[in-house]
Image: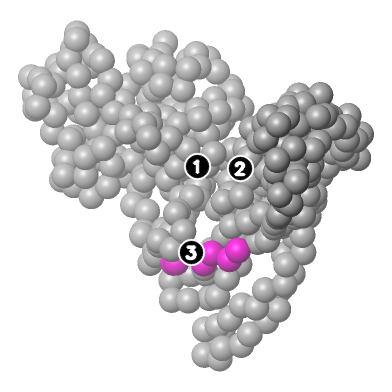
Amino acid sequence: MVKETKLYDALGVSSSASQDDIRKAYRKGALKWHPDKNKDNPQAAEKFKELSQAYEILSDPEKRKTYDQFGLEFILRGGAPPPEGAEGFADGGNPFAGAGGGGFNFGGMPGGGAKTFHFSTGPGGGMGGSGFQFSNADNIFAEFMRSSGGARGGMDDDDDFGFSPFGGMPGGFPSGGRPSAKRSATGSRFNDRRPQTPEVTVVEKPLPVTLEELFNGTAKKMKIKRKTYDPATGKQSTQDRILEVPIKKGLKAGSKIKFSDVGDQVEGGTQDLHFIVSEKEHPLFKREGDDIHHKVDIDLKEALTGWRRTVQTIDGKQVAVGGSGPTPPTYTDRFPGLGMPKSKKPQERGDFVVGVNIKFPTSLTTDQKNKLKEIL
């Protein structure tokens, strides 16, 4: 009989869930609550950590079996019996809440009624380090994505993607220019200690893309040079490498496409490489969000008396636009579903919006001015 269900509840699964169900629930929740995707939501980091810590135990059959039989308190003590006379922990009296902080609160301790406890990650937690310590939530997520064999996830927004040179996904999703902690292997014992490797920087490179490429989606081959180091000989060398960078339909300028371990080899590991999408200027169209804007040139006479045009969209469709006059400079005609594909739902598109650019005459004769004064 399962002693408690707090970790299952955190993932939103039942205590009888299969390992595959647990993996699916964690992936869905972690991608939803990742801090890089919820920068304006301070509670997202705690939710992400809660999901990751629950997954770390339930994804390991040995830890899960022990949790089902004895509960989380038993695991946090490393399998030791409870302190004498301790049925639960009063608020603020949790011996497992070390200097590392973080984690999340569960309502209720085994046998402790409405008590709460707060467990920690990192050094300092777990009775002086003798009990089980949770890994960093980013490292748990990175290990999960790498073991998923090329799974993708969108951070910041759904337009950020990560790839490893071997088809996996980098972890940590660091922001540009800041160090990205490399991942450590996941152990199976409750009191395992995961060594922290030196931090390796992220290199960012611009990736200019045409509006047509963003509309249709494509794969761009990028040639990079990277420095390598052979520890056996102590020699450094430079090698060329071709990366195939996927551009999905509707990707927005500023989106990052992330590759792990493909840059220069430096002390502590290999640099990550982030391509930052930039949109090339188009001679006919201007993108605004998911909409495509196009302006038609008309002269002042047409603006006052009427005009007609046939305009071609980015995918070659012909649309008729015009006005009977007068046409103000703020005129627009909107055609739903003829704009850019939406990156989150490529089967849907934004609008095609036609505006006008009224070309005024550079000069008028006195006679023309007098006639206009009479007419207007």
Q: Which three-letter amino acid code belongs to the residue tagged 3?
A: Val
Work out how far the residue at label 1 is from the one at label 3, CA to CA, in angstroms: 16 Å
Q: What segment carries the magenta color?
A: 200-206
The picture quadrant where one finds residue 294 is top right
Give left or right: position of 178 versus 21: left
Residue 159: numbered disc = 2
State the residue in front, 80 or 195.
195
Name the residue nearer the viewer: 337 or 12: 337
Between circles 1 and 3, the one closer to the viewer is: 1
| Of 116 and 46, the residue lying toward us | 46
Q: What amino acid does circle 1 point to? A: Asp
Question: Which sits earlier in the primary sequence, circle 1 or circle 3?
Answer: 1
Query: Mark 3 sits on what residue?
Result: 202
227 to 72, vertically: above or below = below
The picture places residue 361, in percent across and down from the top left corner, at: 73, 50
Q: Residue 208, position in %: x, y?
A: 68, 61
Q: Does the magenta stretch include residue 37?
A: no
Q: Which residue is drawn at 63% across and 85% down?
A: 238
Residue for point 46% across, 50% down: 172
Find residue 156 and name its label: 1
